[in-house]
Every structure is written in C-alpha cells, then in structure tokens.
Image (tube, rainbow, N blue to C red):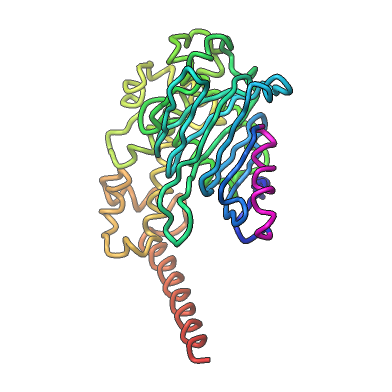
Amino acid sequence: MTADTGIVLRGEDVPARERFDYWRELIGRTRDSEMTSAHADHFRAEMRRLELGPVTLLRSSFPPARFRRTAARVRRSDPEVCHLTLVLDGGLSLTRDDRDPTTVFGPGELYVLDSSQPYDVRGLGAPAADPGPRRVAAMGIDFALAALPLPADRLRALMGRPFSGREGTSGLLADFLVGLDRQAALLGPAEAPRLGTVVIDLVAALLARELDAEDALPDDARGRALVENVRTFVRRNLHDPGLTPAAIAAAHHVSVSYLHRLFTRHSHGETVAAWIRARRLEKAHRDLADPALRTLPLHAVAARCGIPRPSDFSRAFRAAYGLPPGEHRRLALSGHDDAARAAAAGDGADAGE
C-alpha cells in the first residue's frame, strides 16, 4: 500500500482555457500571491502537490510567470508560512523591495521566503525541448514558520539569500527533496508525517548553521538531521569499500558509539552496518536489471556497490533476494527483452495498417 501521491497536474489533464487558473489555484493554497503569465491563454504546466504531515511539497514545470506578494496583501492576510524554493531548470529572479537589488537564482540554487514580507518572483525559463515558450522547473516546500525552532527576527536576515543545493547542508536538503519527489508514489501512508518532520529538521539545521545557532535546535531535531546527513553520505559513497561506521563517524565529527546509538534510535533498531549493506544490495539489484549494464561482469557490478569480494557478494545477494545475482540478471533482462520485442511488434503492426 502506498501513500496518496497528492494532486498531479499534467498539461493535457485540464482544458486549455482553464489550465492557468487551475495551476494558480493549486499554488495559491500555500503561496498566496498575485500570479500572472503572458502565456495564460495557452498555459502548459505540470505539477505534483504532496502533503507530508506538516509540510506541503510542490514540484512544477511551467512557462514564465510572475508571483507578486504586495505589502497590501501581507496586511490583508498573513498565514505566517515559510516557503523554500529549489530551482531545477531555468531561473527565478527575486526582488524583495525597492531598496534591495534583484537576485537571480539558477539551477541547483535554493532560497527561503516567508509570507510576512512582500516579494516579487519572476520565472525566467530555459529553452524548451519542443517548440513553445521557455520553461522553469522548480520544487518548493511550505510549512508554518512557527515550526522552525529559531527566532523569527533572526531568520529574516536569511530570507532571499541564495544557498547552493550542491554541497553541505543545503545540498543534503536538495537531494532529500528531489528523492522525495521521485519516490512519492512508493511512500507508505505512515511515512508522510515522519518525512515532513525530517524536512523541517533539515531546513532548521541549514538555517541554524548559517546563524551559528545550532545549540538552539532541540536534541531530537539535531539527531534526525544528522541521521539524514549520514544516509545521504552513505548513498553517495556506496562504491567505497572503506565505507564503515568508523569512517562515517569521523566524517561527521561524532564518536562511533554516538553514531550507533543515534542511528539505531531513528532507524527502528537497524544498525549502521546493516543499513549500508542493504543499500549496497539494492543498488546491485537495480544495476543487474539495467540493460545498459548487461555486459558489465558480476564482479564489476559488485565492486561498483562497494563489495570487492565476489563470494561475499553472491552469498549476501542470495540471502537477501533468494537467488544468485546472475540468475536475477538473466530473468530481469529476458523480461525486458520480451517487452521490447512486443513493443516493436506493435509498432510494426501499426505501421502496416
């Protein structure tokens, strides 16, 4: 059973004359602003809106548009919501008031705003693959500003500031958000609130570090953020056979005993070593079923996953999946080849009609 993947909007799902208004309504549920676009009459957008307990996650691809929250709009209604945006493609420009220069955010950059301050955001777009207007792709998360365990007056100093989504804590957060979007259809219903809490912990850890206020974070929030840091570190380094609990602890400046205690507490009793082993075998399982890697020897697949001894790999893979790695590859690729032949036969039949 999987979680509700929320609202998914594709360009063809809604009549052309209604698309912009529907897209605008979806965004406006948590991002109240005046939204306009020169392409409103022939608007083609895609969106996923996912509820994760205290957090709303948005992912959208759209033609250039403007999002303007005026001072009058703030005075009329302020839900006190925190907005974080990660640019995936194209660009977004931000102007906060007449005294501040306009900041342009490109792919891989993120920024934070709050609904209590005016802003003017414009989508700049990147060239589209097909004929049509340039496009912007971005992800966003929205949650109550009060959920951040940091003083609001200090947070304001970070609003509108660019953060790199390629390194450090902000890189971890960006990776986590992209991963959530990719796995949305597979999330169990009980996981959503927990993942929303983790998202807020990661945002809080990023902002607290910038404010040199990490001591202000609750112990649980710091613990959850560190565990997600460790998990991302492991995923990025699965190829390294030297990826051990000791190496991970050293990279995160904690003791091995503290790492074990914290990880087990936040992983339903699973140890660090067991989690590493499971992720390595999962990666091998996927790689063996990948047609692009069919010529890669089994020992090379194992080495890519940080398992240098073929005998260890074969034994662990069989224990996890009930069959040897070579047999899994044969079955997975034969199924793929059968599907490809069936699709080719269907295309040929269509062409002959």
Q: In which quarter of the image is residue 49?
A: top right
Could you tell whether 133 is left or right of 146 in the image?
left
Residue 42, visible in the rendered structure: yes
Residue 199 point in image, percent of width and height: 55, 29
Residue 109 point in image, percent of width and height: 41, 33
Q: Residue at x 37, y 16 (%)?
A: 255
* Residue 24 drawn in magenta: yes
| Up/down of 226 relative to 211, above or below | below
Q: Nearer the viewer, residue 208 or 239?
A: 208
* Outermost right residue: 76
Q: Residue at x 65, y 17 (%)?
A: 146
Residue 224, visible in the rendered structure: no
| Up/down of 311 relative to 277, above or below | below
Residue 345 point in image, percent of width and height: 47, 84
Query: Which SS does the magenta portion mostly show?
Result: helix
Q: In which quarter of the image is residue 113?
A: top right
* Residue 317 drawn in magenta: no
* Outermost bottom residue: 353
Q: Quadrant of residue 254?
A: top left
Could you tell whether 26 is left or right of 344 in the image?
right
| Up/down of 169 relative to 59, above or below | above
Magenta region, residue range: 15-32
Q: Nearer the viewer, residue 280 or 349?
A: 349
Q: Nearer the viewer, residue 10 or 298?
A: 10
Q: Residue at x 28, y 38 (%)?
A: 240
Q: Which residue is drawn at 32% across and 64% down?
A: 294
Residue 150 point in image, percent of width and height: 56, 12
